Each structure stands twice: as structure tokens, then as C-alpha cells.
Image (cartoon, grey):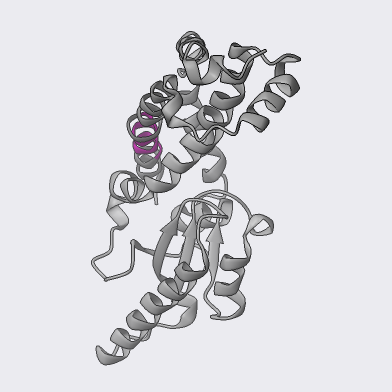
Amino acid sequence: MNQAEKDIILEKAQKWFKNSIAKNHITNTEKLKNASEFDINPFLAVYLSNFLTGKAKPEGIAKALVYPRALGTSITTSFGTNIQRFTNDVLSSFGSTTSGIDIEFIDQINKNKIYCQLKSGPNTINKDDVETIAGHFTKVINLGRTNNLRITHNDMVVGIIYGDRASLNGHYKRIINDYHYPIYIGQDFWHRLTGDENFYTDLIHAIGEVAAEADYNEELEEVISELANTPDVRKLSK
């Protein structure tokens, strides 16, 4: 892969993050003006308000409710659920027509043809997903035999776009230990895909340029203020 091709991926990644992640994040944050968006635990809400601000006033309670959602759960979920759009928008040149496979590429380290299921992060699958992934991979290997194509376990890979091997959850480790399929994660994945050992860092910096534009401070304060003035929050204050 040459520099021009790498630059195209970086540019597409920036557009994907801005259009799929940042926009959805703002939309989901706006919804937090309504108390109905929360399953409010009155004991924890008051405690967390005191923990965060030193008092249990409506604004503190609202902050204790909004911050975890706006800065954690909401955008993390959005990032994970948009992985298919990432595949289509950013890695379309590697797209696969094989059922159960997201992308196909030549591993730039060992030069093998790779059939890859793409995942967003190191904690994004559960127990049932392991069997599903293994089932897809087995079908591809069997299809290869039927068509006289030599496809081995080492050619069937789970690619994870961020993280490192130490952060893999137990379900991913089962794919490696029980089913003997490789996992490429973070820097290793992007190195094998592009041939550039530093591409992962370049990708993080490219996304960071979009993040630098994400000044939503005033709007976030407005969300907190409106939530603080809802009856469900005000009745918890003292």
C-alpha cells in the first residue's frame, strides 16, 4: 500500500468519525435534557451529586446523571454500533463478498490472504458471539475445501481496530485458545493491513483533528441546566 492509499484511509476515517460518531453523539446528548432518558436511582443520584459537587442540588444531580452518559456510555455504544459503517465507509476497498466476513486483505507481514471479521474494541463481544464467529470461520474453511482453495485457521482472523492484546476480554481469548483463530488488534491490525508500523498512531492523530473541533461545552451546560429544572430531578435535591 502506498502513501496515497494510506492518506485516503485516514481521510475517510476522519469523515466517518465526524458523520457517524460526532453527530450521533450530539443528538444523543441533546436527549438527556429529559429525565425520562434516565432510570434514576434516587439514592445513587444524591450520593453522586455530593461526591461530584459537594452538595445535592439539582444542577449537581443533573451533572451526575449526564456526565456518565454523555462522556461514556453514549459515545462508546455509538462507536461500537457503527463498526459496519466503518467497514463500508473507510475500508470499502477491502470489502468481502464472502458470507460472515467483513474484509479480505493480504497480510503485509506474512503475505497470507486474510479473511477478517472486524470488531471495534477489546471488550465488544459476548459468549454467544464467540460461537457465531467460529461458525462463520468454519464455513469459510469448508467452502475453500469444496472449491479447492487452501484456507487455514491462520487465514481466518478477528481484526480489532483499537486496543492491545493485554486488554482483550475473556471471550476474545476463547477465540484464540479454544478455537485457535488469530486476533489482530490495534497497532498490529493496522500494520498488517497497511504495511505501515506507525499507521495506528497516524489514525489516532487523524481522528484527534476531528475531536479538536468538538467544543460542545456551552450546549452541554444547557442540557444539564434543563435537566436540573425537571420535576424528577428537583424533588431529589435538598
Please say if 118 is above or below 210.
below
User: Is residue 59 rendered to the left or right of residue 15?
Assistant: right
User: Is 91 inside the magenta-drawn segment?
Assistant: no
Q: Residue at x 50, y 21 (%)?
A: 232
Location of residue 73 in the rendering, given as x and y in whole percent from the top left corner? 52, 38
Quadrant of the drawing holding the C terminus: top right
User: Is 12 inside the magenta-drawn segment?
Assistant: yes
User: Is residue 225 rendered to the left or right of residue 178?
Assistant: left
Please say if 154 is above or below 210.
below
Q: In the depicted view, which residue is nearer to us: 230 or 95?
A: 230
Q: In the depicted view, which residue is nearer to us: 66 or 141?
A: 66
Can residue 179 be seen at all in this image of the molecule? yes
Q: Residue at x 29, y 85 (%)?
A: 143
Location of residue 194 in the rendering, given as x and y in whole percent from the top left corner? 45, 52
Magenta span: 10-18
Residue 89 quadrant: top left
Q: In the depicted view, which residue is nearer to us: 168 or 199?
A: 168
Q: Residue at x 39, y 38 (%)?
A: 13
Q: How many marks?
A: 0
Q: Residue at x 63, y 54 (%)?
A: 164
Location of residue 115 in the rendering, given as x and y in whole percent from the top left corner? 38, 69
Location of residue 92 in the rendering, given as x and y in whole percent from the top left corner? 28, 51
